[in-house]
Image: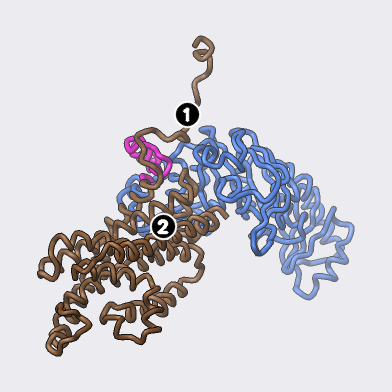
Amino acid sequence: MASAALQPPPARTAPHSAPHSAPPPVLREFSYWLHRYRRTWRGTVVISVANPLLFLAAIGAGLGKLVDHGGSGYLHGSSYVAFFAPGLLAAMAMQTGYIEAAGPVFQSARPQGNYRAAAATLMSPTDILGGHLLFMAFRLALSATAFTAVVAAFGITGPLRALLLVPAATLTGMAFCAPVAAWSVTVTRQARLNGVFRFVLMPLYMFSGTFFSTDQLPGWLHGVIACTPLYQGIALCRSIVAGTATAGGSALHTGYLAALVLLGYLAARRTFTRRLNG
Amino acid sequence: MVAEGLRKVYQPSGFTAVDGIDFALAPGEAFGFLGPNGAGKSSTMRMISCVSPLSGGSLRVLGLDAATHGPEIRARIGVVPQEDTLDEELTVRENLLIYGRYFGLPRPVVRERADRLLEFARLTDKADEQVAALSGGMKRRLTIARGLVNEPEILLLDEPTTGLDPQARHLLWERLYQLKSEGVSLILTTHYMDEAEQLCDRLVVMDGGRIVAGGTPRELIEAHAGREVLELRVPPGDQAVTAEKLQGLADRLEPLPDRLLLYTEDGETALAAVHARGIVPITALVRRAGLEDVFLTLTGRTLVD
């Protein structure tokens, strides 16, 4: 002890061993995005909640009347709005997921972006990725909750099923977020983000069963569509609302979407590290 | 800080940005990398700040190996990147708070430091304004304040005053002097010779990924440029003829597109000799030699094109 007392005190408190009170790095990045969201949330309400609800009102209730009047075997006795709502929820989760993972990741990875600032501190690229993905999951859960609350309020689905819809929609959105983040961190031209939205996301939106049952399509096309993540997300959400969920089917849909999240995350860890610490 | 044979090769292009450089720095020193765009200065800075792995050679920062102790080094250095990387949506103070949290500093500590740093950067009255509303000079000072939030022992500044007006530059230099007097080591890159002369105790001149000369500003000027420069402006067509007539009047003669530079110990005497030979330049100017001349001598090119 005597020799230790003779040691000169350190000149300054080096912060490299973070104090115990500090949250883990992933949460620091999450808190940055939350902080930012406090300023930007108003705009996102329109795109993530108001727009889908307008869609639901116009197509579900308006067009739905026409469909229900004609009657359709593909609906298995349910109303069109009850068929359409879970499809729209999953499609909305895909769209929100893409919007959150494409633009912000691209912007943050540019030389003047926030990722660059964080990478110069104690944050590793994996921490930065993890915190941002966590925020995307938060955004998806928030939008899904708002949408589901309205759907439940109109009696389209019961409150218990609504509770299950939120994680199902969030998982669907994350199945897009993780792979899209892995890709968009490597993008150098913003126009490419719009291109993928128009030529990949929009066809998925139209043909994955959002508006109609894919059983109506030719068999071979149905097989192709069944392999897309949005189809799996819609199938999961729709089975919850319709009360037709089976253990095997739900496990298959959930497993497929979770595998996409995991693969996307693993790929993103590599691309983030290469871009930020290259 | 000691670097030996430091190299950076970018993949997959195979472009060599830094091609085997050596340098060493003492604590408390202000050290500069001077060179034109593309000389390898920023790549060197990124390796020192441990966000870009070495392709070859060795680098020790604060006695730690940069290849294996990245986080430990980053905890003790401050980084002011070439691009400001500020969040324009957030306020001035929020930018400092977020950055401090990235270092895992407790909230009260960051808040107290943010107040002091705002004072230091002369931004206290802008604390709650959005960054988007700040001028270029203010953003730069905020980036510097942010780089100090972890109380670093070394501050890295990549092109600290590029794009700023003269007044903003002088205020920034004055702030950097104060940091230096407080014992913070400064490492900066610049392509402005006046900035290097103002701020650096010692500097190296980089060109094409290599160090072509090093020393104090005065040593470099004496070794590579001499004491004074006589600048002669002559009619555009007469350059070659005039240069011919000027042979023997100076230690060295450097023809530039718009003027002739004569490196000499005594500019006035040389000018008298020019007149004695019957040469009548449009304008003539005698000035002290500077780092711009060093660069011109070493590479045959000017720093800012």
Marks 1, 2: nearer the viewer: 1
> Which kind of residue does numbered mark 2 sit on?
Ser
Q: Chain of mark 2?
A: B
Per the model, the C-alpha gap separating discs 1 and 2 is 33 Å
Residue at point 37%, 68% (across, down): A98
Is residue B72 within the magenta segment? no
Q: Return the residue nearer the eye: A240 or B231.
A: A240
Question: Would residue A137 appear left or right of A165 to someone viewing this image?
Answer: right
Q: Answer with the quarter of the image where residue A257 lies.
A: bottom left
A127 sits to left or right of B244: left
- Residue A212, placed above or below residue B80: below
Residue B103 colored in magenta in the image: yes
Please tell me whether residue B174 is drawn above or below residue B272 in the rendered image: above
The answer for which chain carries disc 1 is A
Q: Residue at x 46, y 46 (%)?
A: A123
Instruction: Give the extent of the magenta segment.
Output: B96-119
Determine the residue located farthest toward the right in the rendered image: B248
The color chain B is rendered in:
blue
For this rendering, which residue is in front, B151 or A143?
A: A143
